[in-house]
Image (cartoon, rainbow, N blue to C red):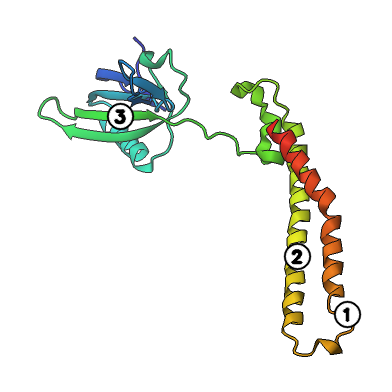
């Protein structure tokens, strides 16, 4: 068995090493299912628990180094036979305990817990429609899905929605003019009080193709 090491500190007198894996399962009860569904949310960090003694010859220096590493919280490199099959690059000292016991002069007992410290994923890249065109929804089980075409359809819907909003604004303006006309006491002084309203109605009728285009875009999106 090789000597476990934390960076450059050799743990020559290790008495106990324990390695833990927690797959991060959450138990879900399903009505009518005999048993419990286990949903995996993601593996937790690998953890290694060690206990042993720091030998008198280097105990003082090794203790100082371990205390400094534990206090800083910086990542460390851990190597031991027990982690041979694990893909672990960096770990952190999650907890550290030292105890000076009665016995050989200068011998110090210790116990520590190491936890895997995985690298952060790359920053998310934002593109049209949230980057789905780059991901490829075929990998998500949606075969034959064309994210680029969906982005085009959504763009058409956005354009048509803008046209509909313009139509609403125009209609509101027409109503305001009608209310203004109704509030006039003497309509005889107005050359043609209905003319502004008929003009607005004509503008609304011109928007009919836009509304029809919106309906087609929605139909294309929903299939």
Residue under label 3: 113
Relative to the observer, which residue lies in front, 7 or 190?
A: 190
Q: Quadrant of the C terminus?
A: top right
Number of marks in the image? Answer: 3
**On the rendered structure, is 145 left or right of 101?**
right
Residue 138 at x, y = what percent?
65, 22
Which callout, 2 or 1, points at the residue further toward the start of the chain? Answer: 2
Which callout, 2 or 3, points at the residue further toward the start of the chain? Answer: 3
Relative to the observer, which residue lies in front, 180 or 123?
A: 180
Residue 49 at x, y = what percent?
29, 24
Disc sitting over residue 10 in the figure: none
Relative to the observer, which residue lies in front, 192 or 29?
A: 192
CA gap, disc 2 and disc 3: 70 Å
Q: Going 31% across and 31% down the picture, which residue do you hit?
A: 62
Residue under label 2: 171
CA gap, disc 1 and disc 3: 89 Å
Task: Determine the image quadrant of residue 114.
Answer: top left
Q: Residues within 10 Å of mark 2 (few under 14, many from 20)?
A: some
Disc sitting over residue 192 in the figure: 1
Task: Determine the image quadrant of residue 25.
Answer: top left
Describe the element under mark 2 as helix, strand or loop. Answer: helix
Q: Going 47% across and 19% down the picture, which residue do you hit?
A: 87
Task: Determine the image quadrant of residue 67.
Answer: top left
Residue 55 at x, y = what percent?
24, 24
Q: Is residue 170 above or below residue 54?
A: below
């Amino acid at each position: 068995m090789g000597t476990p090491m934390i960076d450059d500190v050799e743990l020559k007198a290790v008495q106990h090493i324990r390695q833990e894996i927690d797959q991060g399962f959450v138990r879900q009860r399903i009505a009518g299912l005999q048993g419990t569904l286990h949903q995996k949310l993601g593996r937790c960090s690998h953890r290694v628990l060690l206990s042993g003694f720091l030998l008198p010859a280097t105990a003082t220096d090794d203790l100082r180094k371990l205390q400094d590493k534990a206090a800083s919280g910086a990542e460390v490199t851990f190597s031991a036979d027990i982690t041979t099959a694990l893909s672990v690059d960096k770990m952190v000292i999650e907890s550290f305990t030292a105890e000076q016991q009665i016995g050989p002069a200068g011998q110090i007992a210790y116990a520590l817990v190491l936890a895997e410290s995985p690298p952060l994923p790359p920053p998310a890249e934002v593109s049209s429609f949230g980057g789905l065109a780059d991901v490829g929804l075929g990998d998500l089980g949606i075969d034959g899905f064309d994210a680029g075409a969906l982005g085009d359809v959504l763009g058409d819907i956005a354009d048509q929605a803008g046209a509909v909003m313009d139509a609403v604004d125009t209609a509101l303006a027409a109503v305001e003019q009608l209310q203004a006309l109704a509030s006039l006491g003497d309509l005889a002084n107005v050359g043609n009080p209905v003319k502004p309203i008929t003009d607005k109605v004509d503008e609304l009728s011109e928007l009919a193709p836009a509304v029809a285009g919106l309906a087609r875009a929605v139909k294309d999106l929903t299939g």
